[in-house]
Amino acid sequence: MTATSIELEMFEVGLGSSIYVRLKRSDGDVRILADGGVDRGYAHDHVQIKLDSLLREEGAERIDLIVGTHYDEDHLRGLVPIVASGIEVGELWLPPVADDVADGIGDVRPRRYDMLGAKFAADPEYVGKYVAAKRAVIERCRELEHALGAERRVGWSSHSPVRDVGFADAQDDPVAALRLELGVEGTDACHEDGCEHVDVADAVTEPNVGIDHDYLFYGRWSYFSGMGFVDPSFGLLDYAEMLRSAGESSPAAYSVARIRRAAAKDAINATALDELVQAAVRRGIEIRYHHIPKGRPAPFRWHPSRRRFLRGRASHAGATGLMLLGPSDHLIRKHAHRLPIDDRLVLGLISRIPVKSISPSNQLSYVVRVDHAEQRILICGDTGFSDFMASRTVAEPLLLAELTGLDVVQVAHHAGNNQWFYGVLIEAWRSRAAPPPVMLVSHAKRDRHRPNDQFADFVEHVAMPEGDPFVVFTSTPQPTKVAAFRCSVMPPQGTVGEVGDVRLELTDGRWTLARHAVQV
C-alpha cells in the first residue's frame, strides 16, 4: 500500500507566485501557503479559488502558516482575499522591511516596531503618511526631469503626460496615478526592461554601513568625491538646467527617472502590504516578522499541540520543521540606511551613467527550507541570496551547508535576474552525487525575458549526463528560451495546455510529478 507524505502545488498565476505545501502527519497535517501573488489581468481571488478547491478535497478548513515572501505587490495581492475569508489561519509571516521614511533603525538589532507592516497594524492612518512621503519624492523628481528636458524621453506618456495627472485625480483608485509613474502609457516599465519590479535606485546606501559591492555607488564613491558635490548655493534645478544646456542631461535624467519610479513602486507595494495587514488585524491573525543573525540559519520546529512553528531544532532528522536562511538583521539594517532625497538626487545628477537596478524588496525575501519526511523544499520568493555571500567571492559556510540536500527548489525571481542565486546553489552542490532537485519555475506565458540565459547555463551546469529531466513550468516559455535545456524539462502529466498548475507528490519516499500541463 502506497503512502503519500507530502503534496506540493505550484499554482499557475502568470508573472507571480503561489505555492501550497501539505505535510501529512498522524497527529494532523500541516499546511503552508507561500505567497498568493497574481499577474495583471488575473482576478484578485484567482489563488483563493484554487486553494478553496484543494482544501475542500482535503476536508480541511485551516492553513497553519502563510508566508508573504517579500515586499512586492505581485506576491502579496492575492493573499488579501484568502486572509479576509473565513478560512482559519494559524499565523502570517510578513517580510521584515524596515520603515525607510521614519528615522533609521541605527546599528541595533531590528525590532518588531521598526517594521513597516507593524506600523501599519498599529496605526491604520500611517500608510497615508508613508505614501505622501513617497509622493513628495516623485514631485521632486518631476521638477528635476522637467529641468533636464526629460519629459518625452524617460518614462513619460506621450498621450497623457504624468505631470498632468494629479494625485487628486486618483481618489477612486489611490494607486492609479502611481502606476502612471512606472512607464510609458501607464504600463509597467519593468515588463519592458525584463524584471517585473521597478529599479529601486533610491536604495543607495551611505558608504559607512558596510554595503555590498552590488551597489553602484559603493565601488565608485571615490570617483564621486573627486568630482565634488553640487554647491548648496547652486540649486539642483539650476544644475539640471546647466546639464540640459550643455547637452549632458541624458544619464542624469535616467537616474532621476529611476528614483521616481522606485518611489512610486514603494508606495504601491506599501498599499498592498497595508491591505494585507489590515485584513489580518480584522481577523485577529498573528503577524510575525522573522530574520536571522548574519551568516547563521535559524531553525524552527513544529509543535503539534500549539499548531505552529517555534524556534528550535526538530527532534530528529525526519521531523517536521523549517530552516530560515534569510533575510538577516544585517541586510534589514543596510536597507534602512538611505540617503536623504536631495543627496540621492545629487548623485543622480552628477553621475555619468544611469543608476544600476537594485531591489531591496527582492534581497529581503524570505528564504525558507521546509523539512518533512527527510525531504527538503526550498521556498525563496525573489531572493538574490545576498545573505549567502560573506564577500563577493566567499559564501557564508553555515548558510551554504543548509542547501546541500535539497529535493525541490523554487527558482527565484521567476528564472529572471536573481543575483547570486545560481552561483550559490552551484557552490552548495559541488560535491552532490544525487540528481538535481526538481526546479519549479513560474513566469508569464511566453515571457519575453524569462527564463534568462543565466538559468539555461545553470541547468546545463547541474544536469547529470543522461540524467532525468527536473525542470517544470506553470506557463509555456518561448521555444528559444528553453532550446538549450529542452531535455531537462519534465514531460506533461495530465491535461496538456499552455498554462497549468504543477503538482508534486512524495509517495513512499519518492517524488512523482502528478500534474504538469506545459510541453516544450
Image: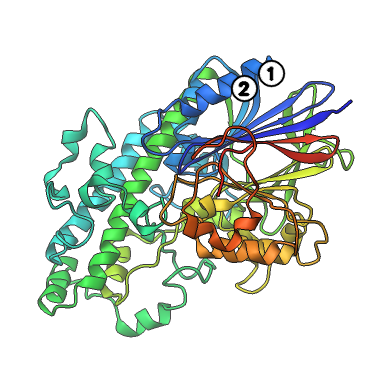
Question: Is residue 426 depicted above or below 16 in this figure?
Answer: below
Report whether residue 334 is seen: no
What percent of the width, then of the height, locates residue 260?
A: 28, 55
Amino acid type of the residue that numbered disc 2 sits on in the rendered structure: Leu
Looking at the image, which residue is at 16% across and 34% down? Answer: 169
What percent of the width, then of the height, locates residue 249?
A: 19, 73
Looking at the image, which residue is at 56% across and 45% down? Answer: 519
Residue 37's tag is none
Q: Is residue 195 left or right of residue 461?
A: left
Total count of labels: 2
Q: Quadrant of residue 4?
A: top right
Q: Camera-side residue: 440 or 158?
A: 440
Looking at the image, which residue is at 41% across and 28% down? Answer: 44
Find numbered disc 2 in the image and state the secondary structure of the residue it sits on: helix
Q: Camera-side residue: 154 or 178?
A: 154
What percent of the width, then of the height, locates residue 304?
A: 80, 25
Question: Is residue 435 depicted above or below 426 in this figure?
Answer: above
Report whether residue 159 is seen: yes
Q: Quadrant of residue 400?
A: bottom right
Instruction: Name the quadrant of the N terminus.
Output: top right
Q: Tell me whether circle 2 and circle 1 mark residues in contact (CB < 8 Å).
A: yes
Q: Is residue 243 left or right of residue 317?
A: left
Classify 10 Å Cα crowding around label 1: few (below 14), some (14-19), many (20 and above): few
Q: How is the image coloured?
A: rainbow
Q: Using the numbered discs, state the Cα–Cα distance from disc 2 to disc 1 in whole angstroms.
A: 6 Å
Find numbered disc 1 in the image and state the secondary structure of the residue it sits on: helix
Amino acid type of the residue that numbered disc 1 sits on in the rendered structure: Glu
Location of mark 2 (residue): 54
Location of mark 1 (residue): 58
Looking at the image, which residue is at 77% across and 41% down? Answer: 511
